[in-house]
């Protein structure tokens, strides 16, 4: 009888350590101490930082330093760390530090290389600090811009999701004044298309997309601004002609409530805080950031480096665990 070929080993997810001065290494360590995660993830970061993170939790662990993903042992007893940097000393905890910014960046870059080479199924990024990046001479507004540039994506969008609502942003990291300028017809169309594609990637066959207005009461028929009638409304009509179930513009102060009640699957928000406040209000431990438009899967927790509690052992890994869950779903859908 001919022997059947063994099933291929699933590719792991790459989980970056985040800023070493923040809570990133801690929440990564807490997550990987749980057996199901240890078998499906490798850490991309600095071995010294991650060894310290595990030691601080007081739980013995077998940490395996990798120079190649193929060397990983994906079992319950091993934590695999792909060495993106090798610091000589631990950076200070809870403060902006150039060495931490550089090490965090090195981990992101290594994870991107692994994803582009097909060696990992996707990337889950722990939080970084923008000031630490700047201190290291790396002038990026955040993760999204690094991933877009280095990942070779022409245009990307942020989807923020939890168990109750999902939102895609028209504009991301810029001032409110710049957001108004950038929220043109092309930006509206791009966000609506990303909302449609993102919803489908999460298993929704025909996502119902609500587009929020920019102005109070969605402009109140032009009394409070004309962006809704001049830009947003025409984009919604164009999206509908493309076959997408888009509607609006809806007032920004009520549309998320309607989405939470099940009327809509995805809300397109015009600017950063309009979309993120509702998601974060429902709990930082539940929110996940998904980057749409990349040639690989990328998710992250919906919170920052939390310097105020770094090093205390009290950080909640819930959002990182949710991000890993979303990344696994998206990677499986792509496969």
Image: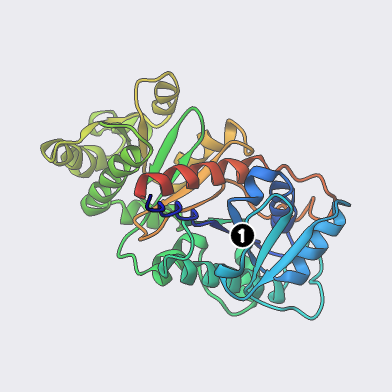
Q: Residue furthest top?
A: 261
- Vertical order, 332 against 217 (above or below): below
Is 69 or 225 nearer to us in this picture? 69
Residue position for label 1: 42
**Quadrant of residue 34 within the rendered picture:** top right
Q: Residue furthest right?
A: 58
**Residue 60 at x, y percent in the picture:** 85, 54
The residue depicted at 61 percent of the width and 59 percent of the height is 42
- Vertical order, 201 against 96 (above or below): above
Residue 273 seen anywhere in this rendered image of the structure: no
**Residue 71 at x, y percent in the picture:** 61, 69
Residue 300 seen anywhere in this rendered image of the structure: yes
Side of 9 where 250 appears, left or right: left
Neighbours of disc 1 within 10 Å: few (<14), some (14-19), many (20+): many
The residue depicted at 20 percent of the width and 38 percent of the height is 236
**Residue 154 at x, y percent in the picture:** 30, 65
Side of 4 where 14 appears, left or right: right
Q: Residue furthest front?
A: 1
Side of 120 where 235 appears, left or right: left
The residue depicted at 31 percent of the width and 38 percent of the height is 200
Side of 162 where 190 appears, left or right: left
Instruction: Name the secondary structure under disc 1.
Output: strand
The residue depicted at 75 percent of the width and 63 percent of the height is 63
**Quadrant of residue 78 within the rendered picture:** bottom right
Is 50 or 35 nearer to us in this picture? 35
**Residue 102 at x, y percent in the picture:** 64, 75
**Quadrant of residue 261 within the rendered picture:** top left
């Amino acid at each position: 009888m001919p022997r059947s070929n063994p099933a291929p080993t699933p590719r792991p997810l790459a989980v970056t350590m985040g800023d070493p001065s923040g809570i990133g290494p801690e929440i990564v360590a807490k997550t990987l101490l749980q057996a199901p995660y240890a078998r499906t993830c490798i850490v991309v970061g600095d071995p010294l930082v991650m060894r310290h993170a595990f030691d601080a939790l007081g739980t013995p662990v077998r940490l395996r330093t990798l120079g190649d993903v193929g060397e990983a042992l994906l079992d319950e007893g091993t934590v695999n760390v792909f060495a993106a940097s090798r610091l000589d000393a631990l950076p200070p905890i809870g403060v902006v530090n150039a060495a931490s910014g550089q090490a965090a960046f090195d981990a992101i870059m290594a994870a991107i290389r692994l994803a582009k080479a097909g060696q990992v199924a996707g990337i889950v990024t722990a939080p970084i600090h923008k000031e630490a990046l700047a201190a290291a001479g790396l002038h990026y507004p955040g993760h999204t811009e690094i991933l877009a540039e280095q990942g070779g994506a022409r245009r990307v969008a942020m989807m923020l999701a939890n168990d109750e609502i999902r939102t895609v942003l028209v504009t991301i990291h810029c001032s409110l004044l710049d957001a108004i300028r950038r929220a043109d017809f092309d930006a509206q169309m791009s966000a609506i298309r990303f909302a449609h594609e993102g919803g489908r990637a999460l298993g929704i066959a025909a996502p119902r997309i609500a587009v929020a207005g920019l102005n109070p009461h969605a402009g109140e028929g032009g009394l409070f601004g004309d962006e809704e009638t001049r830009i947003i409304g025409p984009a919604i009509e164009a999206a509908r002609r493309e076959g997408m179930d888009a509607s609006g513009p809806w007032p920004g102060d009520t549309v998320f409530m309607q989405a939470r009640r099940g009327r809509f699957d995805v809300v397109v928000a015009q600017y950063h805080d309009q979309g993120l406040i509702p998601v974060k209000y429902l709990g930082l431990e539940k929110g996940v950031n998904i980057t749409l438009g990349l040639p690989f899967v990328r998710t992250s927790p919906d919170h920052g480096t939390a310097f105020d509690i770094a090093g205390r052992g009290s950080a909640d890994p819930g959002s990182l665990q949710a991000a890993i869950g979303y990344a696994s779903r998206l990677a499986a859908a792509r496969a």
